[in-house]
Amino acid sequence: MASLKVIIADDHGITRLGLHMLCREALPFAEITEVESLNGIYKEIRTIKPDLLMLDLLMNDTNCLTVIPELLEIQPSLHILVITMADEKTFGNRVLLAGAKGYVNKLNDNEVLKTAIQRVSQGMHFVSQEMYLNHLSSMGHKDETVNPFAKLTDKELEIVHYLITGLSTSEIGEKARLALSTVSTYKNRIFTKLNIDNLVSLINLSKTFNTNSHSGSE
C-alpha cells in the first residue's frame, strides 16, 4: 500500500517542526515534506502529488485563502487542513467554501490537532463546534452587523491583509496579480464597505476583529 504523502506549509521553522512531530504521531507511516513558501507548495504539489496539505493561512505576507481553489485545481484529490492563528470567525467559513476540509487554530492542544490531521487525511471535515454552528447559520443568512469584514469578498480580504502589512500598491499588485489601477479600485471599495477613509482606521479595525493574526517571527 502506498504511504500517505503530506505537505506541511508554514513560513516558521519552529512551527513546521512542531507540526511535523504531531503529524508523525497522528500518521506514523506518512511521507512528510516541509515547505516555507507559496512557490514551494506549488512545486511540491506538482512533484509529489500529496494526499494532505497542512496549510498556514497567512504565510510569507501572503493570504493563502484565494489560492486554495487553484491548489485543488492542480491536485483535485488533495485534502487541505488549514492550521493557523487567523481569526476563525473571519476566515473559517471562507476556507471551507474555498474547498478546504478543515480549519483549526494553532493554539489548540496536541490531541485536537492530531485528531484534525487524522480526520482530514481521510477526507473528512474538521472544525470547532462554534465554527460548525456559525457555518450552518451562514448558510441561511449573513450577519454583517457583528463583523464588518463579513461584507468583503475573499479577494478584498486578501487586499486588506496586504494593506495592513504595509505593502505598497506595486507590491500588492505583484502579490495579488492585479494591475495598479485595480489595486486602487479594490482599496476604495474596501474603504467604502467598511465605512472608513484611511489606512489607520483599517489597521485599527483589523486589530479589533483580529483579521491579521500570525504566528510571529522566529
Image: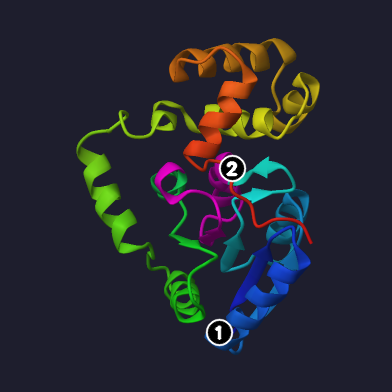
Q: Nearer the viewer, residue 106 or 210?
A: 210
Q: Is residue 171 above or below residue 7?
A: above
Q: Residue at x 65, y 57 (%)?
A: 215
What residue span does the magenta drawing correspond to? 65-90
Element under label 1? loop
Residue wearing tag 2: 212
Q: Are marks 1 and 2 in contact (CB under 8 Å)?
A: no
- Tell me if I can see residue 116 in this picture: yes
Q: Is residue 160 above or below residue 23?
A: above
- Tell me if I can see residue 3 in this picture: no
Circle 1: residue type: Leu
Q: Residues within 10 Å of mark 1 (few under 14, many from 20)?
A: some
Q: Nearer the viewer, residue 209 or 185?
A: 209
Residue 74 sits inside the magenta stretch: yes
Element under label 2? loop
Residue 62 is situated, as x and y percent measured from the top left of the image, at 69, 42
| Left or right for 84, reference 35 | left
The quarter of the displayed image where residue 142 is located: top left
Residue 44 is situated, as x and y percent measured from the top left of the image, at 73, 61
Residue 127 is situated, as x and y percent measured from the top left of the image, at 38, 62
Q: Residue at x 57, y 39 (%)?
A: 66
Cα–Cα span, label 1 and label 2: 30 Å
Q: Residue at x 66, y 67 (%)?
A: 7
Residue 27 badge: 1
Circle 2: residue type: Asn
- Quarter of the figure that contains the N terminus: bottom right
